[in-house]
Image: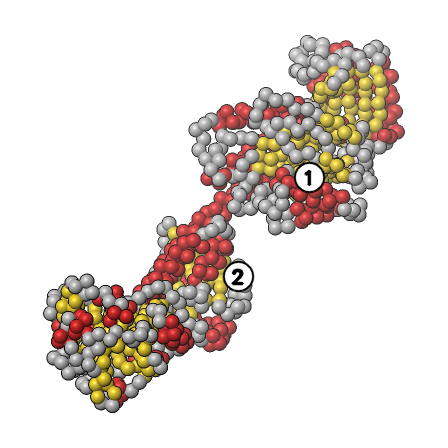
């Protein structure tokens, strides 16, 4: 039983004895006529209300079931035309009193037909019960409810016999309501509510809803001597309210996310069990894969993929496919395919030919229908923006005996129409997100190149769909002299523009790294680039739909850049507003490196500073973005402590230990996945074998060239690289001669035997050479051209003491692969 505060139209009921004295007075009579129960009980009704025609049971208005419109006197002395209905109370065939029902008058005073309709044919049914809750009088409307509609004429024994309250209603609602009526007798307070119940002996399978009010009838002392009950069938009105409430609930619950499966689940959760006992949402399989819906009707067989299903019988599936997320082909004569072909909803009973044929196609489906006595079905197409996306099936079984009716189909169509727009939005978002992720992943390194200087492992976790694609990135860049550049960065914002900006910055870092600047110089040039990108985007750039409203011109980022030299074991680092890296030493001690923070990229005008640290062999360097350590479950400090704990827990030193360490860190920090995108780069540095590095100081005398050339050839023979001797002699001769002729002291030659053979000549001059094409009769200008032709690549880098010119040669081997100085295959 549910109470909604509903009540029937205002009616006043008065009970008199055979002398016309008031013995019962309801609160409705008090509101209508002005007198309270103490003022009314015991007084003649004619004197009190000025209605002489109904003075006594034997008066002019006597008899059973008489109605009239009378000028009734109010307590304030005014008179009002009211409809008055009189019913005799009898005992043993003798009249013992009357029940008078006062109601609003009809439109035309004296219109007896309207009066009779109000009090006899009105949907408001009245009953009077004594203190034992036996019925002592019923209106004509109440007789219809209790099955006594065929009785006419004077009251006979069947109509005089006291009848219990449960004669009005059947089922648990009646018993609960009887308890309410007894409470009215006990407290003397009127009660009103709505009751779901069944008509006694009724053939209608649908449960009815009745608005019932119980008003106490009081004696002269004010004590209840009975109850007047007014009943109205408000089933249809209640159903309208329930449909509106269901649609309101659906508008709040469906489409809370841009996830297709979640939106489908929300639709089923709204519909079950308030509309149906079972609901399933099937989308066209091609749409789930990201394709656009085909225009026009879908004919013949269709392949549908289930995205959501809910049943009041837990664990039972009303389909041939075994689990949500699976796909199945529906034949052209199946109800789902017919619904998609016509584009119209359909209501079926189990006995309909379409359902019968479909059920018998699958023994499993037929068994489920028999087991749970499924009796009616609804199939509603999912259509949005002129395209058909799929179909929703609703079913009722023995849990709801009432079959679907046309109004249920209309409600289902409204629900699906609401969900269809949300599903289409989710589908479009999923397609755009997939495109953004594809772009983002294509801009990230597909695999990290093997480096002799370091062993690396990385993880990248894209942001949640709600946040959108982010701009985190990492990179490992091979530099000259077996050095390696390590990068991790984070572009501000989300969406396509963030991913595109990330790609541009990553490309810029790689390009700048080829010039070999120091880390602080690289960040300074990258800061200038970010400023130019913002200026070039302009202020007219609109918001990016996938970025949560951020303007595409707002380019900003944080970045950390490090250069590690395996020859010296030194690492130079600089950061632009990025979290400080973590260094774990071989003894297991972990600390954050104390680096100057630097401003984020895009502010301009502020300096960046580098810091140099020594990385012992066997140590661990961790570079990361803030999405890894910040979470909705914990703050930044807690995340950093968790990361330290994850990195310092021992893991055996097997080849995949860094990967295992990455997995553990991600698992500990982001057990439920990241809200923002996150990147982690773990680096284990290596030290180059000193026997694989040869260094010579060179005098500024041209005669020294021959001696250096001979010593370098002998060192190549010691390394087993005699085949590279000829080219190396030419390269050493050219680079050392240029340094003596055009450079300054001190001059140094260094050979590095690693994955490639590197030749480096350093001098004290900061003037960088450039390659030019010599003309026919020029005596010079061919040296660097010769070096470029004989080696894989060459370049120059500035140092604090001058410059270094370097070139690299590939190493010949019997099997076509070289071996690095650290034992790694080339």
Left or right of 707 on screen, residue 61: left
2, above or below 532, in the image: below
Q: Picture coordinates of residue 721 (x, y %)? A: 83, 30
Q: Which mark is residue 692?
A: none
In what quadrant of the picture does the C terminus appear?
top right
In what quadrant of the picture does the N terminus appear?
bottom left
The answer to whether mark 1 and mark 2 are in CB contact below 8 A is: no
Q: Picture coordinates of residue 225 (x, y %)? A: 32, 77
Q: Secondary structure at mark 1?
A: strand
Q: Residue at the location (46% across, 47% down)?
A: 428
772, above or below 391, in the image: above
Q: Residue at the location (19% across, 62% down)?
A: 76
Res 813 quadrant in image: top right
What crowding class fits label 1: few (fewer than 14 Cα within 10 Å), some (14-19), or many (20 or more)? many
Q: Which residue is mark 1?
A: 681
Mark 1 vs 2, N-terminal side: 2
Left or right of 82 on screen, residue 236: right
Q: Which residue is mark 2?
A: 324
Q: Residue at the location (78% across, 33% down)?
A: 615
Res 121 quadrant in image: bottom left
Left or right of 799 on screen, residue 176: left
Q: Picture coordinates of residue 575 (x, y %)? A: 66, 29
Q: Which is more toward the observer, 689 or 588?
A: 588
Q: Which is more toward the observer, 442 or 413?
A: 413
């Amino acid at each position: 039983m549910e109470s909604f505060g509903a009540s029937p139209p205002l009616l006043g009921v008065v009970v008199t004895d055979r002398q016309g004295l008031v013995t019962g007075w309801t609160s409705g009579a008090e509101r209508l006529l002005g007198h309270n129960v103490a003022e009314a009980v015991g007084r003649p009704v004619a004197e009190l209300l000025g209605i002489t025609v109904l003075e006594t049971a034997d008066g002019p208005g006597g008899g059973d079931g008489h109605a009239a419109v009378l000028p009734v006197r109010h307590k304030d002395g005014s008179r009002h035309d009211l409809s008055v209905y009189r019913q005799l109370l009898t005992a043993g065939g003798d009249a013992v009193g009357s029940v008078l029902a006062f109601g609003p008058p009809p439109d035309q005073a004296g219109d007896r037909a309207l009066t009779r309709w109000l009090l006899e044919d009105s949907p408001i049914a009245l009953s009077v019960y004594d203190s034992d809750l036996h019925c002592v009088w019923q209106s004509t409307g109440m007789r219809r409810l209790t099955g006594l509609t065929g009785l006419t004429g004077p009251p006979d024994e069947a109509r005089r016999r006291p009848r219990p309250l449960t004669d009005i209603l059947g089922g648990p609602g009646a018993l609960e309501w009887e308890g309410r009526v007894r409470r009215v007798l006990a407290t003397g307070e009127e009660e009103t509510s709505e009751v779901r119940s069944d008509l006694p002996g009724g053939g209608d399978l649908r449960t009815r809803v009745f608005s019932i009010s119980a008003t106490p009838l009081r004696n002269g002392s004010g004590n209840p001597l009975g109850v007047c009950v007014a009943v109205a069938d408000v089933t249809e009105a209640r159903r309208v309210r329930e449909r509106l409430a269901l649609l309101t609930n659906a508008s709040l619950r469906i489409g809370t996310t841009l996830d297709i499966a979640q939106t489908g689940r929300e639709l089923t959760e709204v519909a079950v069990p308030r509309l149906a006992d079972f609901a399933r949402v099937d989308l066209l399989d091609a749409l789930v894969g990201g394709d656009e819906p085909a225009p026009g009707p879908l004919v013949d067989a269709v392949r549908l993929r289930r995205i959501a299903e809910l049943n009041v019988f837990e664990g039972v599936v009303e389909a041939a496919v075994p689990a949500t997320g699976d796909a199945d082909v529906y034949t052209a004569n199946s109800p789902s395919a017919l619904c998609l072909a016509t584009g119209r909803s359909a209501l079926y009973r189990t006995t309909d030919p379409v359902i019968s044929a479909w059920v018998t196609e699958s023994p499993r489906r037929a068994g489920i229908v028999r087991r749970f006595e499924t009796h009616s079905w609804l199939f509603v197409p999912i259509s949005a923006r002129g395209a058909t996306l799929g179909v929703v099936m609703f079913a009722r079984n023995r849990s709801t005996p009432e079959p679907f009716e046309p109004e249920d189909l209309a409600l289902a169509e409204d629900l699906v129409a609401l969900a269809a727009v949300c599903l289409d939005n989710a589908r479009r978002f999923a397609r755009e997100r997939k495109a953004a992720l594809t772009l983002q992943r294509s801009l990230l390194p597909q695999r990290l190149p093997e480096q002799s200087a370091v062993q690396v492992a990385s993880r990248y976790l894209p942001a949640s769909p709600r946040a959108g694609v982010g701009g985190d990135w990492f990179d490992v860049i091979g530099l000259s002299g077996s050095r390696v550049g390590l990068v991790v960065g984070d572009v501000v914002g989300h969406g396509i523009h963030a991913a595109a900006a990330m790609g541009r910055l990553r490309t810029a870092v790689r390009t700048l790294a080829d010039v070999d600047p120091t880390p602080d110089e690289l960040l300074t040039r990258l800061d200038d680039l970010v400023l130019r990108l913002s200026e070039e985007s302009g202020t007219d750039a609109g918001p990016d739909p996938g970025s949560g409203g951020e303007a595409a011109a707002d380019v900003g980022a944080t970045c950390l850049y490090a250069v590690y030299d395996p020859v010296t074991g030194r690492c130079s680092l600089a950061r632009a507003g990025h979290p400080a890296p973590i260094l774990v030493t071989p003894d297991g001690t972990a600390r954050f490196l104390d680096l100057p923070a630097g401003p984020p990229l895009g502010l301009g005008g502020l300096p960046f500073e580098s810091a140099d640290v020594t990385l012992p062999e066997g140590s661990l360097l961790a570079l990361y973005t803030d999405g890894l350590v910040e979470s909705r479950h914990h703050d930044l400090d807690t995340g950093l402590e968790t990361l330290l704990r994850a990195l310092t827990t021992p893991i055996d030193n097997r080849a995949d230990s860094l990967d295992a360490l990455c997995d553990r860190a991600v698992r500990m920090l982001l057990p439920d996945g990241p809200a923002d995108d996150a990147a982690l780069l773990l680096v284990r540095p290596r030290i180059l074998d000193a026997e694989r590095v040869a260094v010579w100081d060179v005098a500024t005398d041209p005669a020294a060239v021959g001696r250096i050339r001979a010593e370098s050839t002998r060192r190549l023979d010691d390394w087993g690289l005699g085949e590279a001797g000829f080219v190396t002699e030419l390269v050493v001769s050219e680079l050392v001669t240029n340094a003596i002729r055009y450079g300054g002291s001190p001059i140094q030659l260094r050979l590095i035997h690693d994955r490639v053979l590197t030749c480096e000549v350093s001098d004290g001059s900061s003037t960088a050479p450039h390659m030019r094409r010599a003309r026919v009769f020029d005596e010079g200008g061919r040296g660097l051209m010769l070096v470029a032709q004989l080696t894989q690549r060459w370049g120059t880098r500035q140092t604090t003491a001058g410059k270094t010119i370097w070139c690299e040669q590939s190493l010949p081997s019997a099997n076509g692969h070289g071996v690095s100085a650290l034992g790694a295959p080339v």
